Amino acid sequence: MLNRSRSDTEIVLAYIGGGSLNWAQVLMSDLIHDRTIAGEVRLFDIDNQAAQRNATIGNRMSEAAGLSIRYSAPTNIDDALIGADFVVVSILPGSFDDMAHDIDLPASMGILQSVGDTVGPGGYLRAMRAIPAMLAIGRAIGEFCPKAYVCNLTNPMSVLTGALYAAFPAIKAWGECHEVTKLRKIIAWLANRAEGTDRFGFHDVQTNVLGINHFTFVDRAFVGGRDWMPDYLAFAAEHRSKGWRPEPIDQTNEFARLYEDHNQVKFDLAARYGIAAAAGDRHLAEFVPQSWYLDRCTDWGFALTPVDWRRRDRIERQAAAERVQTANTAPTPRPPSEEALVAQIRALTRGDVLVVNANMPNTGHMEGLAPGTIVETNVLFSGHGIRPIRAGRLPAAVEALVRPHADRQNALLAAVISEDAAALEGLFLADPLVAPIGAERASELFRAMIAATAKQLPAGLADIAA
Amino acid sequence: MLNRSRSDTEIVLAYIGGGSLNWAQVLMSDLIHDRTIAGEVRLFDIDNQAAQRNATIGNRMSEAAGLSIRYSAPTNIDDALIGADFVVVSILPGSFDDMAHDIDLPASMGILQSVGDTVGPGGYLRAMRAIPAMLAIGRAIGEFCPKAYVCNLTNPMSVLTGALYAAFPAIKAWGECHEVTKLRKIIAWLANRAEGTDRFGFHDVQTNVLGINHFTFVDRAFVGGRDWMPDYLAFAAEHRSKGWRPEPIDQTNEFARLYEDHNQVKFDLAARYGIAAAAGDRHLAEFVPQSWYLDRCTDWGFALTPVDWRRRDRIERQAAAERVQTANTAPTPRPPSEEALVAQIRALTRGDVLVVNANMPNTGHMEGLAPGTIVETNVLFSGHGIRPIRAGRLPAAVEALVRPHADRQNALLAAVISEDAAALEGLFLADPLVAPIGAERASELFRAMIAATAKQLPAGLADIAA
Amino acid sequence: MLNRSRSDTEIVLAYIGGGSLNWAQVLMSDLIHDRTIAGEVRLFDIDNQAAQRNATIGNRMSEAAGLSIRYSAPTNIDDALIGADFVVVSILPGSFDDMAHDIDLPASMGILQSVGDTVGPGGYLRAMRAIPAMLAIGRAIGEFCPKAYVCNLTNPMSVLTGALYAAFPAIKAWGECHEVTKLRKIIAWLANRAEGTDRFGFHDVQTNVLGINHFTFVDRAFVGGRDWMPDYLAFAAEHRSKGWRPEPIDQTNEFARLYEDHNQVKFDLAARYGIAAAAGDRHLAEFVPQSWYLDRCTDWGFALTPVDWRRRDRIERQAAAERVQTANTAPTPRPPSEEALVAQIRALTRGDVLVVNANMPNTGHMEGLAPGTIVETNVLFSGHGIRPIRAGRLPAAVEALVRPHADRQNALLAAVISEDAAALEGLFLADPLVAPIGAERASELFRAMIAATAKQLPAGLADIAA
Amino acid sequence: MLNRSRSDTEIVLAYIGGGSLNWAQVLMSDLIHDRTIAGEVRLFDIDNQAAQRNATIGNRMSEAAGLSIRYSAPTNIDDALIGADFVVVSILPGSFDDMAHDIDLPASMGILQSVGDTVGPGGYLRAMRAIPAMLAIGRAIGEFCPKAYVCNLTNPMSVLTGALYAAFPAIKAWGECHEVTKLRKIIAWLANRAEGTDRFGFHDVQTNVLGINHFTFVDRAFVGGRDWMPDYLAFAAEHRSKGWRPEPIDQTNEFARLYEDHNQVKFDLAARYGIAAAAGDRHLAEFVPQSWYLDRCTDWGFALTPVDWRRRDRIERQAAAERVQTANTAPTPRPPSEEALVAQIRALTRGDVLVVNANMPNTGHMEGLAPGTIVETNVLFSGHGIRPIRAGRLPAAVEALVRPHADRQNALLAAVISEDAAALEGLFLADPLVAPIGAERASELFRAMIAATAKQLPAGLADIAA
């Protein structure tokens, strides 16, 4: 639509990884709530059966809501992409077995990881597996829908959004992540408390975001006519030693027990550095040496990644999806999510003015990080397209934590592209979770991890283990 | 207000040049229409009487409208600035006599200028006169209200906004100009025509702006769900040879006869370069060699600067203001202007999200121009403060016209600061209106112009004529 | 040799354009004088007969001198390049007819050119013709001898050296030009005069070079223990109005009459800008508006380009070469030239430390010009390879003259590569020799020049004239 | 001399720290050997008695050698600097007690340091102490001898050379260090061994140097007509596990036992990263996590810093100097040192062409590190002045080790200048020797170290401990 000569009311959206049991279903529900977007959604997945299932469910929901959104599940990616106005990329790089190795092998050398999908040894191997697939997707977009807006939802987000740009530099892509929402909610809570009201929601809080995905910071949080950052920093200092959350974790909910935190890492970093860290504690902890938080994660109020839980969760979700498919009724849409994707599509299509954080190549809008680095800052979504907004610069001491990760992510991507085994090993050694075990043991670990996931790697990289 | 620890409803605004007979009165009227902004407006002017007059008028208008805006006219700039939340700078560098020399001396060497306030010999000398004053204002802001938002309305805008940043690099300043509005109106007209409607106004047109003040370009114009740039370029090509305007110039109105154009230069540039030039023809013509447009300005449908008219106009305005003052009644506010200033203040104060073009130092958001150059691109005004938005890059052939001006403006500012007479003369010679007369005659002209305005220059610069 | 695993004493040099009647013969003579370089010289030329002739002459000279340099004339470029340690590129882009059009068509519009091979309309068209050939040579080097050192002797030097890097970014190429020698000789003359001696030659003068080819400047000239720049500037000011040369031009020598100058342009620029211009007056004059020097070139002591003379000269040289070939004797080598090439080869081969000006991509060593611009500054030739040396920055007023040319050269190269006709026409218009004739006439001229040389252009560019 | 209007044969050299018992005496001896440099050497020291002693000794040596070098010991720094052509800065930041704290306090937290003067907690505190003094020296140079060439010999070299530039940006300063000589000697040894000769000394080896002081790398080592880097890397791999040195360490020599190494760290890094590390092992080990080398330094063949030895050594040197002073005879000059300083002076004075590694602000010549970072690369010393030479870029994995140190050094300098206590603490935490002990303990350590050296710090920094 956007790229045709005349305005009309329909878009074509290609969803790569459209068999997803989570994100695709969030999108389908959010489109129901939005009601302004019409057109065609093509769900492509290497598991076509899963995509078909989602298409069936989607079409039923769309019909039930009286909307003209049509879902299909093409069997090859070219058919999905050709002429698309929007592309969503949400793939799973490797299997749960691979993810288990990402965690277990480092653990056997004493390296703890709470998520293992961004940095640290787990994030590193995950990137090595996913980059080749992402490069292929980027090239296909360049060929079949070069003017499409492309939203990447896949982790490790920085490296993989970078891969899209490396494959097709003129791509109009951004990486989308909701972690900053967590901080915006706390700020809204503080503003409400001060006013004795509940009028502010996280959408009302204008945060200036700086950093890289999952290691983002906020230096300004404006709501109700003023900046609440000083209040937040005071609050963080007050609750630094025990943490805080608006309501206690529901201990009967396994997901909550495993995935929620009480902001103690967030507060500790804020108190130490004078700026708010924005992501969840499980992510933040992985960017600094293990001795800071991970070594005593229970004391800091968060849990380590349970690959096992993900396996069970997936089985449950799959069974649920199959039940819905069989039932031959339209499922009730989920409540509106907190994801920004549908609002972004609307802004790009209709000219709404939306300012929200997203991951894009640094064009200088984030001072202190290298040009081209995938940075997470505010981006303007509107009739102007997607345009990064000047973010400024992190305080020196925080930049000293962030920049080395960002530089290694850039170098990792380049090294996978050039299949530079020596660089890949050397960069792995320099990660702050890896470096302390010593260069020699880190080299061993790297080769063991490569060997464990060799099937998922291109030959040139799998050879490293040999 | 913005910089205090707690939100409240009042702002303090210092207006430097507050005796102005035009801009200050526009602001006073626009504040009446806005009705959301309260507080104190301090009108400072070296002509305190004029400022007093404006304050009197403003207070009457404010009271009549039932608003709590209070106007005062402090006699020194420090009192005006101390603790200000906003500063507006709108000064007149030199007298009308100086402006007459800016035009007449070059004319005596065959150099024609349609405005003479931005580039060309006139803009150059005007900059030399105004920079020292602007540096002083910038330093005072750094001392008395370092966190204030500062809006510069003074021409030559690029150089003078640069002077504010040179004097106080942490300043939060932008240069404000309405020229791009002209293009947005044409786009709205095109969209309305296509739809057979009149629903679009210039505010609905989202233009992506690139360039430097008065030599700005637009590569995307989104309204009603799509980009109208291809339509505009076709329209420009169609009307390139004769020009076009929605309604004829009112020939009984001297201002209109002298200041309006029929977009022929704008269309010629668009047809030639495949991108829309945004400013008025009188401005655009001065950035290219005289042989392109100025030599035959009548054929191109615009007039040369009439300093004489400005003199008469000023006398009329002053008389009018005096009548209002004497009348002891509150004048009717002017209709809402098309200026963005009040909307900008509101966005910064209340967190509205406003995207509009403004002049700020290049932080990399305008590719192809040097860092620090004062560029005109879209800027986000909101609770985030003032933040430039990624604009992209001009086509190569347009950049080849724009960049030399931008570089010379940067160098001119630096040369005035360091009182580098040799650089000042050399840079003058390289302006495209000056260069063709030959280096030797250009040197003569430069010295003559310096001599004519020597009283307005610091000793170190006035000496050049010696 | 340099790229083999073990040192030995022989090099392989490929000379593209090896049928040359001038440069190739200079090289052959200089190798005789050097006596340290041995190996194989492969003369490739699209005129294989001319290359064969040079090979025959070269082998005779080499044998007569008792040297083991072997000349051959391979019939295809791949055979010439494969395994080469050094490549010299000296080609003639287009015919003398093309060169005549480069001069005559602009002249018919009133544009004068003294050389027409660098900037101005002539240099521009010459670049358009030569870039495609140069790109092909660069790609072939990347394939057949990627580690070779590559010396480009072809004009327009900046653009064409840039083309080599565009085709093969890892190339180790520099552009070689002797114009700066002219200034070094004057400095040596000044130092000798001051000392009452003749001990200094141009090799003893250490000049710091800044700029782009044929528009280079020198801000320091060290010899005999001190910097002579202040003396030079005083001398230039003294002789600005009438020029000066150490001995009068030999009026009986047509070449001298046509190609020599008396430094008046050089002195005028030096006096005006406080820095020494380094190239010959005929080159310098083309970089500034015609009204500065070209309009009255006789008064300024230099002549316009005589294509006709070049035709006659070529016929004479060719006849001479044929006579030598027929004579079956070894010709006497020419006296050692002032060219740096052989010394550069020796430095790279043996580790001599040689600092001399050359044209290479700006890596930041020339402040104020864009990264990647082919700049002319000092370069270190040694066992370290070819490495640019920090040059510093031009004075602002000179940068204002140089930078626009440099930016247009970069943009011209990019536009030829992408076959962007609109950019090519727009950039042509902005040249200071072209701009004053008006945009419309300049467009006409551009199309006429394209038409005249269309056979020499790739189809995508030749179409512009259609 | 260099800055006077006419060449003459004498220089004025100001030596800040001229009471030195080591470096000043090296210089005095090297000047004897050189015999081409004449003039005045002003030894300034806060211990004027020590400077007087050196002046006395220097004058005797100069006279005995028949040279016209005159030594004096002015009592204030302004008198030393005024009109100087050269300045040498070699000061001791703090006392041996301070240095002991630099080592002992971290050791009490388990942090080992082999030198403690560059990075790690020791280098950090040393920088904090020295920067204010260095800024004062830089400002004085700007005032009293702005055109002087300035050689800094003081550690931590990167930060302190940066301080000179921060204080006076137009300074012509470089930091001088001999560590790379160690690698050049090994290369010469390899080349000699291959040829069965001893003709190559380290001066014959042309190394391309990249990195920051004490963490420098070499990617090319040219001698005898070819690059020996592949041979070196093979040799390093061969001797990686046990180390190697041309001759065994003299175990009877305490200095040798404490300060010498057998290149095992150097070889391990070379084998791991495919590029030669250039500095001594004791320095290299401090730039990577302790688990790599420092934890088992005996196994790796090097010793930890013995402050105690330095105390004893100083006492011995002082006694020796006093004996010489008393003896009233001219001491025999030391043999020519391997320091480059005198050759640098000669090159700058006479126009010799010298290429040698030195520490200067990055002007883009070292890709991958921030502009302005003090980098160690080759620099041209000649009649052109001091000019960095394009070095290129480190391999990605090595850059990942180097860049974070370089960035922290830049940030440390800025934080001391702005007295930003929060930044100073945060940056301290991120050093790879500090980070693994945990943020909380690292903060404690920082405060303890500040407290211990508080007397040597400006009040604004000493307060951090409060």
Image (cartoon, coloured by chain):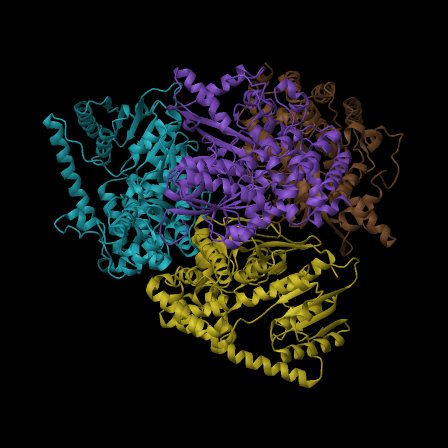
Chain colours: A purple, B cyan, C yellow, D brown
Quarter where residue B348 is shown? top left
* Residue at the front extreme, as displayed: A327
Q: Position of residue D76 (x, y in %)?
A: 60, 26
The image shows residue B300, relative to residue A190, as above or below, that is: below
> Left or right: where does residue A188 sit relative to residue A79?
left
> Left or right: where does residue C20 sit relative to residue A81?
right
* Residue at the left extreme, as displayed: B327
Say if residue D446 shows up in the picture.
no
The image shows residue D432, relative to residue C265, as above or below, that is: above
Say if residue D184 shows up in the picture.
yes
Quarter where residue D67 is shown? top right
Q: Nearer the viewer, residue C181 or D295?
A: D295
Q: Nearer the viewer, residue A10 or A383?
A: A10
* Residue at the bottom extreme, as displayed: C326
Q: Position of residue C37 (x, y in %)?
A: 74, 65
Q: Nearer the viewer, residue D421 or D460?
A: D421
Q: Position of residue A62 (x, y in %)?
A: 43, 40
> Left or right: where does residue B36 sit relative to residue C239?
left
Q: Residue at x 53, y 68 (%)?
A: C130
The image shows residue B310, relative to residue D76, as above or below, that is: below
The image shows residue C116, relative to residue D326, as above or below, that is: below
Tally the numbered discs. 0
Q: Residue at x 41, y 74 (%)?
A: C104
Q: Quadrant of the C terminus of chain A?
A: top right
Q: Nearer the viewer, residue C127 or A203?
A: A203
Q: Residue at x 58, y 15 (%)?
A: A242
Q: Position of residue C120 (x, y in %)?
A: 43, 64
